[in-house]
Amino acid sequence: MKQAVRPGLAALLLAGLLIAALLALTAASTAAQPPAASLRAFIEQLDAKGAPFTVHFKAALPGGDMFLTLPDAGGKKLAELGDDFLCYSEPWNNTRRARCTPFSNILSLSYTP
């Protein structure tokens, strides 16, 4: 009686399935990041509604903050949106100061609908 599958061939097939599964997981995780144009449009929509939203950053903003809620009670508000960056302004002495960060520094954005 012949063996149905040789041990070496079975190991090769198993390795191939494992690689295919890893590639599928990698493709899914990179697709989770929306294109910059979509993120910009989404933030513009929230700002137009006056809906507060919180941004979680990969790298801390000046002052060490990892989270930023706009607008906030302290006077921080959205100042400008570019194709790939977000700027906010905050009270500073008797004027306002603007700070900007690239979209690539954004981990997540949360809001209450």
Image: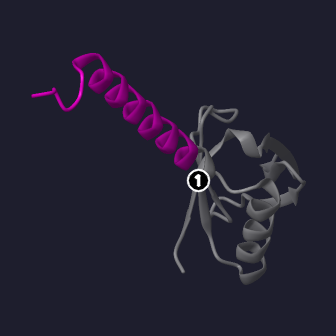
Image color mode:
one colour
> Given the current orientation, which residue lies at the most extreme front position?
1
Residue sitting at 42 percent across and 40 percent down?
21
Would residue 41 be found to the left or right of residue 14 on screen?
right
Residue sitting at 85 percent across and 48 percent down?
84
Q: Nearer the viewer, residue 23 or 94?
A: 23
Would residue 87 be found to the left or right of residue 2 on screen?
right
For the stretch drawn in magenta, the main secondary structure is: helix
Residue sitting at 71 percent across and 61 percent down?
75
Write down the quadrant of residue 102 in the picture: top right
Residue 5 x, y percent position in the rendering: 23, 29
**Quick check: is 7 in the magenta stretch?**
yes
Would residue 53 be found to the left or right of residue 76 on screen?
left
- Which quadrant is the C terminus positioned in? bottom right
Q: Nearer the viewer, residue 24 or 58?
A: 24
Kindly identify which residue carries mark 1. Answer: 32
Residue 51 x, y percent position in the rendering: 65, 77
> Given the current orientation, which residue lies at the most extreme left position?
1
Query: Badge 1: few (under 14), some or many (20 or more) residues near its Cα, within 10 Å?
Result: few
Which kind of residue does numbered mark 1 sit on? Ala
Residue 89 x, y percent position in the rendering: 81, 53
Write down the quadrant of residue 101 in the picture: top right
Would residue 15 be found to the left or right of residue 10 on screen?
right
The vertical placement of 60 against 45, above or below, is: above
- Which quadrant is the N terminus positioned in? top left
Residue sitting at 57 percent across and 44 percent down?
27
Q: Where are the magenta residues, as a range?
A: 1-29
Residue 70 x, y percent position in the rendering: 67, 62
Number of labelled discs? 1
Q: Nearer the viewer, residue 94 or 30?
A: 30
Looking at the rendered structure, the secondary structure element under dot 1 is: loop
> Given the current orientation, which residue lies at the most extreme top position?
8
